[in-house]
């Protein structure tokens, strides 16, 4: 069968949950740690990384350095124990949508698809207004599930909300970044609405990653390698679908 690889971006998170995925014949686990002391998880490979660029730097590092040897199916996730829900500003958010489990990400090629994204947020740029999927802030909704977007369309999302200190607004020009590194196009300054996976968790096939050349990811990695908490690291969370599609 297909081999899956879990790529986990770790800093100080509890990794006890990872053991349920180690020691399996068709799953490899790589923990990229930016901690001062390397974690030890039996059956997982732990590798040190310089503390730059948030989880985006970790994901891009993996793609660039394993481009020729990627697994059949790669799951990218922060190392926070996966659990339901999202609360603004809470670093322990597990970021799972209601009725979605981490196993849904680990299972290669669900229903024949070459990627698995559960979109549970969307932002409009450059204003940085945001909305969220009901399933990440409320549980037990009958119409929720592991689909990429809510089954009931617009009714599956909250109203748009705005925080003046939203991370997407700290500095810089998101549209300039998007056109230069993601779309590879001229910045037309037109507003952009992006749906994304809050918490930057998604999975995909080797072929889907290979839809872009290695140099594409390497260029982005350079942009994410300059500081610990770069503005680009917050923007990247919103653009991953466009990066791979």
Image (cartoon, rainbow, N blue to C red):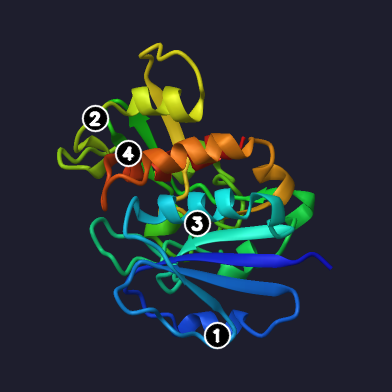
Q: Residues within 10 Å of mark 1 (few under 14, many from 20)?
A: some
- Image spot of residue 2 (x, y percent): 79, 64
Q: Left or right of 72: which side holds 96?
A: left
From the viewer's perspective, is the residue at label 2 or at label 3 nearer? 2
Spatial CA distance of label 4 from label 3 is 18 Å
Task: Look at the numbered disc 4 and give the secondary structure of its residue.
Answer: strand
Q: Which mark is residue 183?
A: none
Q: Which mark is residue 130?
A: 4
| Residue 20 drawn above or below residue 194 | below
Residue displayed at 73% across by 57% down:
110
> Where on the picture, by quarter, is residue 179?
top left
Q: Earlier in the sequence, mark 2 or mark 3?
A: 2
Residue displayed at 43% across by 69% down:
79
Per the image, the residue denoted by label 2 is 172
Spatial CA distance of label 1 from label 3 is 19 Å
Task: Look at the numbered disc 2 and give the secondary structure of its residue.
Answer: loop
């Amino acid at each position: 069968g297909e081999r899956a690889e879990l790529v986990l971006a770790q800093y100080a998170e509890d990794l006890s949950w990872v053991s349920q995925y180690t020691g399996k014949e068709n799953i490899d686990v790589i923990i990229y740690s930016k901690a001062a002391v390397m974690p030890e998880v039996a059956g997982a490979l732990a590798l040190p990384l310089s503390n730059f660029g948030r989880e985006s730097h970790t994901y891009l590092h993996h793609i660039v350095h394993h481009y020729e040897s990627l697994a059949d199916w790669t799951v990218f996730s922060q190392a926070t124990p996966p659990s339901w829900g999202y609360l603004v500003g809470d670093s322990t958010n597990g970021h799972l949508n209601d009725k979605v489990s981490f196993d849904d990400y680990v299972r290669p090629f669900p229903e024949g698809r070459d990627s698995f994204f559960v979109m549970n947020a969307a932002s409009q740029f450059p204003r940085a207004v945001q909305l969220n999927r009901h399933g990440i802030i409320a549980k037990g909704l009958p119409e929720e599930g592991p689909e990429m977007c809510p089954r009931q369309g617009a009714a599956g999302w909250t109203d748009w909300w705005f925080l003046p200190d939203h991370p997407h607004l700290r500095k810089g020009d998101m549209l300039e970044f998007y056109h230069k590194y993601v779309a590879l196009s001229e910045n037309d300054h037109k507003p952009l609405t992006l749906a994304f996976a809050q918490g930057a968790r998604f999975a995909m096939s080797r072929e889907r990653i290979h839809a872009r050349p290695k140099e594409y990811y390497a260029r982005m990695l350079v942009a994410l390698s300059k500081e610990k908490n770069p503005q680009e690291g917050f923007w990247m969370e919103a653009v991953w679908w466009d990066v791979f599609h």
